[in-house]
Amino acid sequence: MSTQRTDGIAARERAHFEAIASERTELYWAERAPAAPRRRAMRAERLLAAAALDGEPGRRILDVGCGTGEYTREIARRTGATVVALDVAPLLLARARATMPANVRLVAGDIEALPFPSGAFDAVVGNAVLHHLRLDRAIRELRRLLRPGGRFCFAEPNILNPQVFLERRVRFIGRWLENSPDEIAFTRWGLRRTLEGLGLVDVTIRPFDFLYPLTPRSLLGVVERVGRVLERTPGVAEIAGSLLVSAAKP
């Protein structure tokens, strides 16, 4: 199913990711790194814990910006919920389709105008998606799709992390790492103000992720344990790589 614009940000994002997908399987350099499987599992665990949907039958989840479906498969497997996986790039969805479980439906669409009724989902989730979007338009649409009390849960890049800062502020580094032309990154307090201003409540944003993608497999356990300590350390936690975003519709 497809409901897409062909102009502006949506068109540039689609062109960027389909160009990468035409050359290789992974869309991001971090997905080719040794720590990628563990990072993916860790993020899926945290997103679903924030969404509070584990073990609840009959739930519906919208997975936004699903790409080739790495996180979609984790979400579908862990929850058993009906998952609608959305992306702007049909080529990515075509690649994802062959390995999707039966409880997943793939949709190519524009997040600013989606073909679902209001209140259709118990949760909307996504990994590294909001920083590609026009938040004022996208958040209003996602809020519309949530049932009252539905959860809004995302993992997003933290601009206070040194590498993320350089990627966004030094253009040649961003191009070298194949960042898309419109993506940004957030501070947790700035993003919180934005989400609250757009009508979400119970907004909690906390830094996480000190497990660097290039960590050798033999050191994953040690680095992850140290990272969890750093996430609880005032001051140091603020430079973690990502922000875990949790909010709700009133």
Image: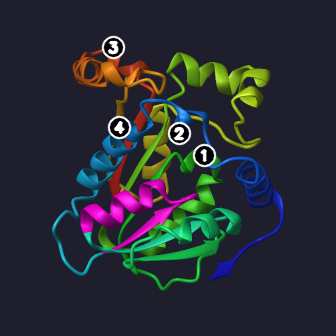
Question: Which of labels 1 and 3 is toward the front?
Answer: 1
Bin the neighbour count of mark 3 within 10 Å (Cα to Cα): few under 14, some 14-19, many 20 and up.
few
Q: Which residue is mark 3?
A: 235
Q: Answer whether labels 2 and 4 touch (C-beta < 8 Å).
A: no
Earlier residue among tags 2 and 4: 2
Please report the residue visible at 77 percent of the width from the left and 30 percent of the height from the top.
Answer: 175
Please report the residue visible at 72 percent of the width from the left and 35 percent of the height from the top.
Answer: 178
Q: Which residue is mark 1?
A: 26
Q: Answer whether labels 1 and 2 touch (C-beta < 8 Å).
A: yes
> Callout 1, which amino acid?
Glu
Earlier residue among tags 1 and 2: 1
Q: Is residue 80 visible?
A: yes
> Callout 2, which amino acid?
Glu
Alpha carbon distance from label 2 to label 4? 10 Å
- Mark number displayed over residue 31: 2
Q: Which residues are magenta?
A: 60-79
Estimate the x, y position of residue 99 in percent, counting from the top left.
48, 67
Earlier residue among tags 3 and 4: 4
Q: Which residue is mark 4?
A: 38
Alpha carbon distance from label 1 to label 2? 6 Å
Estimate the x, y position of residue 215 in percent, counting from the top left.
42, 21
Q: Is residue 151 left or right of residue 10?
A: left
Asked whether residue 75 is drawn in magenta, I would say yes
Does residue 21 sit above or below 78 in this rendering? above
Earlier residue among tags 1 and 3: 1
Callout 1: helix, strand or loop? loop
Quadrant including the N terminus:
bottom right
Callout 3: helix, strand or loop? loop
